[in-house]
Amino acid sequence: MEMKEPFDIELGEVIYSVFPEEEDTYVVFKDGTEYVKIIKDTDTTWLKLNPETELPMFGMDEEVNLIGEEIKKELGQ
């Protein structure tokens, strides 16, 4: 598996730094601090991972979905 380079995305006034990990999993930094780890669930849904267990936390999180959509755009998916 090729290692993907980190990249930045912008949502409104906020810039997030995205670090790809294993397939469809990303660590997102906000203001220089680790903010959230997310995983692609479906083509339109992204899930936040529990910071302690790294298990998916089911439930709508609009910000996570917006970050995920920007990641898809950045990666040309």
Image (cartoon, rainbow, N blue to C red):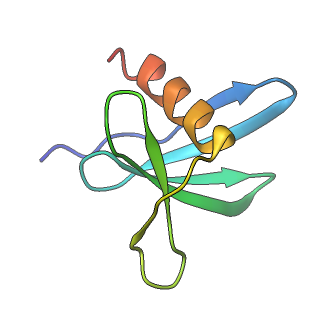
Residue 8, percent across and down? 61, 33
Residue 2, percent across and down? 17, 43
Q: Is residue 46 left or right of residue 63?
A: left
Residue that sits furthest to the front in the current view:
59
Comparing 3 with 42, the one in front is 42
Q: Is residue 52 above or below residue 20?
A: below
Residue 70, percent across and down? 55, 25
Quadrant (top left, top right, bottom left, bottom right) of the C terminus: top left
Residue 62, percent across and down? 66, 39
Q: Is residue 10 left or right of residue 21?
A: right
Comparing 48 with 3, the one in front is 48
Identify the residue shown where x is 63% and y is 47%: 61
Residue 46's image quarter? top left
Q: Is residue 38 above or below residue 34?
A: above
Residue that sits furthest to the left in the current view:
1
Q: Is residue 31 left or right of residue 7?
A: right
Identify the residue shown where x is 51% and y is 73%: 50
